[in-house]
Image (cartoon, rainbow, N blue to C red):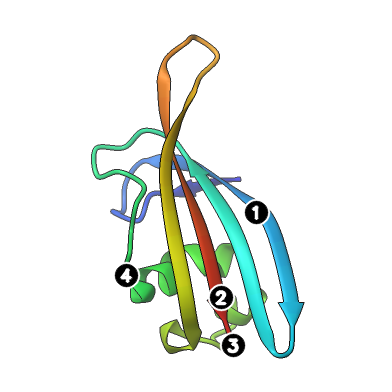
Amino acid sequence: MKIKHWQGYGIIEATKIEKKCRDGKTWIAIKLKGNHEWGLHRDDTYDIARWLLPKFCKEFKTGEKDYRSIEYFALCDGWERGENGEYIDTCLYEIQFS
């Protein structure tokens, strides 16, 4: 799905890779793809909960959860080759919340 960048302008591609629920905890992996002058890496739980998670988790969309429920997150930056051979930035977000 195409989403607005966390900085407030520009569009990037976001894809849910996997989502698991177990023992009252949810783990989700989301891959972002696109080029933006501010990058794709955002390591702030408040912004992750406000900007990214509502698009993939109904608990964050309805306000049932907030940034304090995030227990763990990891980010992995990378790149891919586009159709025309250009480099496209990627960032994999792995997030666990209760």
Name the residue that disc number 1 marks.
16
User: Do the numbered discs 4 and 3 sit on residues whose CB atoms are within 8 Å?
Assistant: no
Which label is found at residue 63?
Answer: none
The residue carrying pointer 2 sits among few (fewer than 14), some (14 to 19) or many (20 or more) residues within 10 Å by Cα, namely some
- At horizontal 73% and vertical 70% (from top left) the residue drawn is 20
Quarter of the rendering containing residue 38: top left
In the rendered view, tell whether residue 52 sits above or below residue 69: above
Q: Earlier in the sequence, mark 1 or mark 3?
A: 1
Amino acid carrying label 3: it is Ser
- Going from N to C along the chain, the mark reached first, 2 or 1, is 1
Does residue 97 appear in this view? yes
For residue 96, the mark is 2
Mark 2 vs mark 1: give the one in front. Answer: 2
Please give the residue where the numbered disc 4 appears in the rendered image.
44
Residue 33, x across and y down, in percent = 48, 38
Q: Is residue 64 left or right of residue 4?
A: right
Question: Which residue type does callout 4 highlight?
Answer: Asp
Question: Which of the two labelled residues, at mark 1 and mark 4, occupies the earlier sequence position?
Answer: 1
- Check if mark 2's residue and mark 1's residue have beta carbons within 8 Å: no
Q: Which residue is mark 3?
A: 98
Picture coordinates of residue 65, whole percent (x, y): 54, 87
Q: How far is the residue under mark 4 from the one under mark 2?
A: 14 Å
From the top left corner, tell me how far across and down residue 49 is, in percent.
Answer: 45, 74
The nearer-to-camera label among 1 and 3 is: 3
For residue 53, above or below residue 65: above
User: What SS does tag 1 mark?
Assistant: strand
For the N terminus, give its image quadrant.
Answer: top right
Tag 4 secondary structure: loop
